[in-house]
Amino acid sequence: MAFSRWLEHLPWVVELTGNAVQISIVWLFHFLGYFLVVGTTTIVDLRILGLAGKGQNLDKLAKQLFPWTWLGLLFVTVSGFLMFAGYAGQFFPAGVFWVKIGVFVVAIIFGVIVQRNVPRWSSMASIPSSAKAIALISIILWFGMILASVEVPAFIACI
Ligand code: HEM
């Protein structure tokens, strides 16, 4: 808690949070990153489930999209930290914010599992059920992540 109070009172954090243009750009990057991460991972997951891009080679499709996923992750993490920093004292005790971060970490772990296994699954005659289960869980996790995100303001008086 002392750390969050220290963080939100840092001069550059106060300046950034209080400047409407600067903080709006940070929010813009948060949403851009969010669309990149959730959009690209969902397309690959739906391809694994056989619900999208059926005519496309899974490995080729995933290799085109994964760099955008990692760029999106960079955007959400940096912008999310800056957004957190401005009101750290209020976010820190909000359990729902930590649920969001927890689901985020688990969703990334599933994303990495998919990324590592895509070349193998792609070379098989048919995609195994275990891969489909992982892809489905990945989609559910991102959905949960968005739900947790939109619930955070309800617990934070300042947003
Ligand atoms: C792909 C991952 C992420 C997604 C999909 C996501 C989604 C969102 C959404 C939809 C909002 C707006 C909520 C609203 O005002 O209704 C939001 C806000 C916010 N996000 Fe993220 N976020 C992600 C990652 C992160 C990370 C990694 C952090 C922290 C390091 C973070 C910190 C915040 C903060 C502090 C806010 C403002 C408070 C709030 O409204 O929740 N986000 N995020």
Image: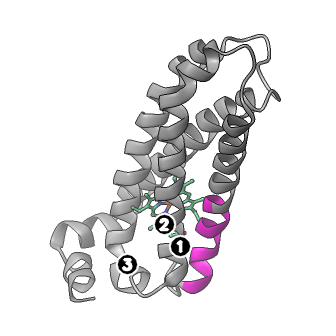
- Residue type indicated by callout 2: Gly
- Residue type indicated by callout 1: Val
Decide if ligand 1 comes within 8 Å of the CB at mark 3: yes
Q: Position of residue 79 (x, y in %)?
A: 38, 54
Query: Which numbered disc, 3 or 2, marks the residue that appears first in the sequence?
Result: 3
Number of disc labels? 3
Query: Which numbered disc, 1 or 3, marks the residue that appears first in the sequence?
Result: 3
Tag shown at residue 139:
none
Q: Quadrant of residue 8?
A: bottom left
Residue where numbered disc 1 is placed? 99
Q: Residues within 10 Å of mark 1 (few under 14, many from 20)?
A: some
Dot 1: what SS? helix
Residue where numbered disc 2 is placed? 102
Residue where numbered disc 3 is placed? 87
- Is 72 rendered above or below residue 78? above
Dot 2: what SS? helix
In this rendering, which labeled residue sits more in front, label 3 or label 2?
A: 2
In this view, the residue in front, 110 or 1, is 110
Q: Position of residue 116 (x, y in %)?
A: 47, 30
Q: Residues within 10 Å of mark 2 (few under 14, many from 20)?
A: few
- Is 153 rendered above or below residue 100? below
Q: Which residues are magenta?
A: 145-155
How far is disc 1 from disc 3 in space, using C-alphas?
A: 17 Å
